[in-house]
Image: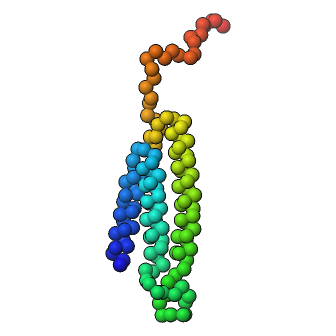
Amino acid sequence: MELAFALIIGSLTFSGVYLVLRARTFPVVVGLTLLSYGVNLFLFSTGRLMTGGQPIIGSTDTYSDPLPQALVLTAIVIGFAMTAFVVVLSLRSRADTGDDHVDGNIPREEPKDHQSIEQPREETGQ
């Protein structure tokens, strides 16, 4: 069970990092979400992977730590809020720039008949 859990955590982390390194906003958002899922599973696994373990010390010989479960529940709520914020931020960036590149430095081509708004100024010599 530990090997399967480790492979799942590794694949979520690998695919999350791969998608974060993409140049578009939607794969970056999905990559951050997958990366947070991998971290949540890693935190959850620190509380001992067992079935039927009681979270109270002294009730049985083996117990499971309840603290990682509480941390994961908190991380899920915070991760959902941050995902919603990043989605809104990326939609706003797409609306403002007209492009969904992450770096935002992609030059847009201007029409050839575009005239400069600023007129040349005459020098007064003062």
Q: Quadrant of residue 74?
A: bottom right
Q: How many marks?
A: 0
Q: Look at the picture and state if 57 lies above or below 88.
A: below
Residue 77: x and y, percent?
57, 64
Q: At 46% across and 56% down in the image, what residue appears?
A: 32
Q: Position of residue 78 (x, y in %)?
A: 57, 62
Q: Is residue 117 left or right of residue 107?
A: right
Quadrant in the picture for the N terminus: bottom left
Identity of the residue drawn at 36% across and 65% down = 10
Whether residue 11 is situated above or below residue 104 in the rendered picture: below
Query: Quadrant where the C terminus lies?
Result: top right
Identified at 46% across, 40% down, the residue is 100
| Residue drawn at 55 percent across, 42 percent down | 92
Q: How is the image coloured?
A: rainbow
The answer to whether 107 is drawn above or below residue 85 in the figure is: above
Image quarter of residue 121: top right
Seen as rendered, the residue at the extreme right is: 126
Q: Is residue 71 above or below residue 110?
A: below
- Nearest the camera: 125 or 110? 110
| Position in image of residue 14 (x %, y %) | 36, 60
- Nearer to the camera, 125 or 12: 12
Residue 119's x, y, as percent?
Answer: 57, 12
